[in-house]
Amino acid sequence: MTTLELKSEKRTLLGKKVKSLRRDGILPAVVYGGKEGTTPIELNRKDFGKVLKVAGETTLVKLFVGEKVKNVLIHDIDRDAVTEEIRHVDFYEVNMDEKITTKVPLVFVGEAPAVSDLSGILVKAMQELEIRALPADLPHQIEVDISQLKTFNDNILVRDIKLPNNVETIEHEETSVAVVTPPRTEEELEALKGTVEEKVEEVAVETEEKVKERAEEKTEAAEK
């Protein structure tokens, strides 16, 4: 597994003062855990973006804080609600000798015959799997081969997933991961279409009522 590295420095600006850092392309962050406790840091925004694309939140990152090295996971990312720009990052320092529990994304690979041959609909009951492993053994993602879904009666369970070496899951082994359901009949599609149209009409009526209420409120306010 390729080791990802990221350089940072201890941060002295705190609170509202970090706005000046962001203007200069510097990303404020915090490292939790470890013997030193909480450590405020700052790092290059572009450098972090490159690491995030590869690491996600489940891959170990070697974080340089000045001359010190910390093994961390990207624990939480705060984004601007409008621009989606990253505003702050929380890292969690791990002990390389202690197993940790985390959730890893599932990636569905292959082709399900029940979809390609029977026009079924693939239903992904799980999008991520909770696992337990040493930090160095954490996978970036786990693949699920859907080629075994040949009929509508087939079901991929947690126990069917091939996990990497030294990785175990804490999910119940009989939990469903993916199935293929039969295609909808014309009658079901017509019924679904009617339900959607009814809901659209309800929303339209509700919207008209809201507009009328606001107009009345403005009129009352102007008269006072």
Image (cartoon, rainbow, N blue to C red):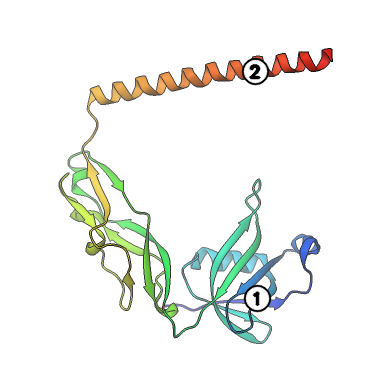
Q: Residue at x 24, y 52 (%)?
A: 111
- The residue type indicated by label 2 comes to Val
Q: Position of residue 63 (x, y in %)?
A: 59, 78
> Few, some or many C-alpha atoms within 10 Å of disc 1 (few <14, some 14-19, many ≥20)?
some
64 over 28 or under it: above or below? below
Q: CA distance from mark 2 to mark 1?
A: 50 Å
Quadrant showing the N terminus: bottom left
Q: Position of residue 127 (x, y in %)?
A: 37, 54
Q: Is residue 68 left or right of residue 194?
A: right
- The residue type indicated by label 1 comes to Thr
Between 184 and 101, which is closer to the camera in this rendering? 101
- What is the quadrant of residue 38 in the picture? bottom right
194 over 104 or under it: above or below? above
Q: Position of residue 121 (x, y in %)?
A: 27, 41
> Few, some or many C-alpha atoms within 10 Å of disc 2 (few <14, some 14-19, many ≥20)?
few
Q: Is residue 46 left or right of residue 223?
A: left
N-terminal of the pair, mark 2 or mark 1, is 1
Q: Secondary structure at mark 2?
A: helix
Q: Residue at x 35, y 22 (%)?
A: 193
Q: Residue at x 56, y 73 (%)?
A: 92
Q: Is residue 1 left or right of residue 163?
A: right
Residue receiving disc 1: 38
Q: Position of residue 126 (x, y in %)?
A: 34, 53
Residue extending farthest front = 224
197 over 64 or under it: above or below? above
Q: Secondary structure at mark 1?
A: loop
Q: Which numbered disc covers residue 204?
A: none
Q: Residue at x 71, y 15 (%)?
A: 215
Between 85 and 17, which is closer to the camera in this rendering? 17
Dot 2 and dot 1 residues touching (CB under 8 Å): no
Residue receiving disc 2: 211
